[in-house]
Amino acid sequence: MANLHGYAGRILYVDLGAETAHEEPIDGELAEAFLGGSGLAAALIARTRLSEIDPLGPENPLVLMTGPLVGTEMPSAGRLSLCALSPLTGIWGESNTGGFLGPELRFSGYDGIVVTGRASEPVWLSIVDGNVELRDAESLMGLDTYETQEAIRQELGDDKTRVGCIGRAGEHLVRYAAVMNDHGRAAGRTGMGTVMGAKHLKAIAVRGRETVPIADLQGFARITAAVREHSREEIATQAIRMAGTAGYVDMATMYGDLPFRHFRTGEWDGADRLSGVRMTEEYLLRGRACHRCPIACGRETRAPVYGLDRVDGPEYETLGALGSLLAIDDLEAVIAAGHLCNRHGLDTISTGVTIALACELAERGILNRATADGLTLRFGDAVLLHGLIEKIAVREGIGDLLADGSAALADHFGVPELAATVKRLEMPMHDPRAFGGMAVTYALSPRGACHMQGDMYSVDTGQVALEELGIAPGDRFDASEGKGRIAARQMAWRSLYNAMILCQFQNPPAERIAEALGAATGWDLAPADLMTIGHRILTLKRTINAHRGVDASSDALPPTFLSPLEAGGTLGNVPDVDRLLAGAYGELGWNPRTGQPENPTLARLGLGRAAEPE
């Protein structure tokens, strides 16, 4: 694979049950069709017997995959995808993380890792300079994610070792457990930490000194310099650099995008106390950057009331999920709650939404004190929040019920309509009543409700504009078929991003992305080619979900979001989901009756009969 530029050329296969590891050369044709990241991971997972896999079983493959830009000079290309069938949703599971873990995997000589089987006892995987070893993890069990990373670095004697690990939530199979790395970086959504826990895999540590082969070094250097300059000049990235993603809190409140009290209230006077500006002025110690990132959106903060002198975060989603969604306006309490989730390895979005549902159920008289361990569940209670996070992480008492997520909680009490989920994944902190195009993203996202699969709020606020690809800002309340088509294009574009892998805060022109990929790989690529790759990846994930029972009836928003809010920035708007989806299905070439890709679409994208369930 020496001639495959842009790739290390090797994938590591680890069978935990057999305690074996071997490497295979990456398939060049597969790489060209799906690039890397979640795209290439989907191509590998699609080869398995999808309908027969138990997400918590040893047969569920866990794929960690980089992309052709990861670990290069390309700004903001320091990410890693983790993919498997999700223990939370039962369908396609995908998450990606920043920091330095992905680049270090490339430096260790691999583009990705495929983990199968289940170890008989807890283990961790060491990959150092090409040497692969499974090690006993018994002494690491019960440690939080920070302690685990430090213990492994000490054992290897190298403080530059990068570690992806689970905390107590993953060990106890909380269905939305995260994989944590570096300083509070998380592969948070869909329970990839749960998959590691089910495999008795506590951590993966990587260290290497290889470089990524680039086809055109001079051309790549010129292009990446232009991308860095674009980042320095772009207003959106400047704002993120100054206040992190938390800087969006004030704007989100104005638009009605920031949710309050389990998505049921349009206004709340505590929002300004959670603002990124306030966090910067009162609690920020410094910004933190991922590999080769000029933006540094990560936050290092403090919460002295809770004895926290130097901790991670929080970012916008955490401020919403653990703050406004629960009517908690104590910023230090939210900082502490986010840190607790990171220590235990919990997705902050699913954690906050599930606790908010529990508070609503209690408010409605559905969940009583006896079921809640004698606790009074209520909005606005930071002490309750911290205690519930601890209970969830170890499945203690009411925490055992909450650990299965919002959909399971609502099902347990016979009120599935109250769950703020799509395909059993909790809604993020962006309301589709504020940006209608997000209704398409949530309904059609391959992993369920996900703002990162097609961020139409970024498009309609003007942060992303790719008019040459038919992605242009417009009326945020537009619910036409045309808006549905734009949303589908944005989903295809972000599918490409999640395959390269490139951070979504870095948004240079499409032509520049094509040039960067071409210089790295030696392929002749135009922006239209990139869209085709993104469309192919999105469609392949849809075919995977078809094997898991997803069809057009699954493409629906929770009832909550089909009712207008009486106050706030949504102005009583409700998205016309049917009309938006009609446009999106048409754009993607998916049958509007079944929700499945049409045969001509599969043929055009080179996916053959992949959509036919087994």
Image (cartoon, rainbow, N blue to C red):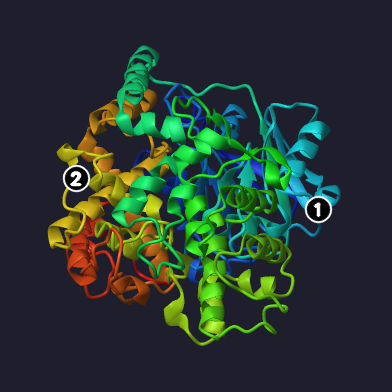
Among the 4 quarters of the image, the one containing residue 533: top left
- Which residue is at the front of the view, 225 or 237? 237
Among the 4 quarters of the image, the one containing residue 4: top left
Sequence-wise, the earlier of marks 1 and 2 is: 1
Q: Report if residue 298 is visible in the image.
A: no
Q: Secondary structure at mark 1?
A: loop
Instruction: Locate the C terminus by quadrant.
Output: bottom left
- Which residue is at the front of the view, 304 or 402? 304
Q: Report if residue 582 is visible in the image.
A: yes
Q: Which mark is residue 473?
A: 2
Q: Nearer the viewer, mark 1 or mark 2?
A: 2
Image coordinates for residue 211, horizontal then vertical, percent: 54, 21
Neighbours of disc 2 within 10 Å: few (<14), some (14-19), many (20+): many
- The three-letter amino acid code for the residue at tag 1 is Met
Q: Residue at x 68, y 58 (%)?
A: 170
Distance CA(mark 1)–CA(mark 2): 49 Å
Image coordinates for residue 221, horizontal then vertical, percent: 38, 15
Image coordinates for residue 561, horizontal then vertical, percent: 33, 70
- The three-letter amino acid code for the residue at tag 2 is Pro
Q: Residue at x 43, y 49 (%)?
A: 272
